[in-house]
Image (cartoon, rainbow, N blue to C red):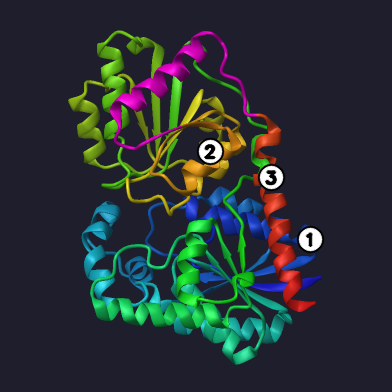
Amino acid sequence: MKKVLVIAYYFPPLGMSGVRRVFNFCKFLPKFGWEPIVLTVKDIEYFAYDYELMNEVKCKIFKTSSLDPLRLAKIFPFKNSKNFAKTRTRFKKISNFLFIPDNKIGWLPYAVAQGLKIIKTENINLIFSTAPPYTSLLAGYFIKKITKLPLITEFRDPWPFSTYSSLLHQMVNEQLKKKVLTESNAVITVNKYIESELLKTLKTNVRKFTIIPHGYNPEDFKIKTYNKHSSVFTITYTGSFTKERTPVYLLKAIAELISEEKIKKSDLRIELIGLHTERERNIIEKLSLEKTVYLHPYLSHQNCIQHLINADILWITTGEKEGIFLPSKIGEYLGARKPILATVAEGSCAELIRNTGTGIVVPPKNIPAIKEAIYEFYLKFKNKELIPLLLSKIEKFSYINLTKELAQVFNKQIS
């Protein structure tokens, strides 16, 4: 069996959506003749850990030290560790100014050193590096320069993820990005918009690029029990919120539908699962939706899947200027086979839902359009016309099929 060094800063037992894509690739790569050897970081101060995922990890994992802020915060806990998410947000601008390409740069020397040892001892055939963080791509770049092994880089998000702090930051990042893209034998992106942005940097060789969208593991949805409040129309969302990705417009639409007596409060349940702040709680209280909206903390992946299965529709949202992003939760929404309400910017997510016919797409701040979509779903629910998504619409997003595509990219580089 051929071996691939997988460079992934985010990997189980870390939780949240950024972990599951590479985790599923590693799970299914052996089916297609590739043994993954994972290079990641030791425990960090992070939003959530999901130790259940470790029961499914069968590959070798090498963990290194790091001098990045998340690792240092784990070693030397700070006073506000209980308010980690708030503290991290507060220092985001400072972090973006101090570190290039991101604040994981303190992991780079450790990752490169350990990666070279792994290649020497494990007889590695190929390097696969996934981002964010973009430091992972730099680690792959330097290891490839030293070993001359083929390098595959993956962009789950665009580089930059956010705006640059200054013109100098932009210039340095663009040069780093160009070096990584030039040295990469192949590049994976999750949608055509990220591919297009990267091609502006590379300017040549579109044949390097392959689009592999986010997906779902069909095994996760096989043994779940259906335990829903059968008479209650349930809308479920998984993930955290930001200033751009906010529940305020959806909740205002729901409050208006209740006020207009189009939907009874007792007929409706909103499940918001993930990391929440006082901002979300204040919105719920202001709209008098405390008995309608249920805030759940971060749940293990298996518990989260159960909530998706128990929902009637699933809600996804982005900011108005975030059309280039494809939230990774969309894959598991498809796997749950429930209709999707997408309050998203025009772009990748909107196109995927329209092309697959798996939901309704409306602008993220258009309250009348959101009301209309919710009411349409609600009437179908009352008339028992809400049916599971057809398997034919979603099976191409199975991580078994997506990993097969990835393995084909690997195979081309060593043939």
Mark 1 and mark 3 in contact? Answer it, CB < 8 Å: no
Tell us which disc is closer to us: 2 or 3: 2
Magenta segment: 361-389
At x 44%, y 26%, the residue is 235
The disc, 2 or 3, on the residue closer to the chain's N-terminal end is 2
* Few, some or many residues within 10 Å of mark 2 (<14, 14–19, 20+): some
Amino acid on which disc 2 is placed: Ile
The disc, 1 or 3, on the residue closer to the chain's N-terminal end is 1
> Which numbered marker is on residue 353?
2
The disc, 2 or 1, on the residue closer to the chain's N-terminal end is 1
How far is disc 1 from disc 3 in space, using C-alphas?
17 Å
Residue position marked by numbered label 3 in the rendering: 396
Can residue 232 be seen from the camera position used here? no
Residue 80 point in image, percent of width and height:
23, 57
Residue position marked by numbered label 1 in the rendering: 32
Can residue 388 be seen from the camera position used here? yes
Q: Is residue 128 magenta?
A: no
At x 76%, y 61%, the residue is 30
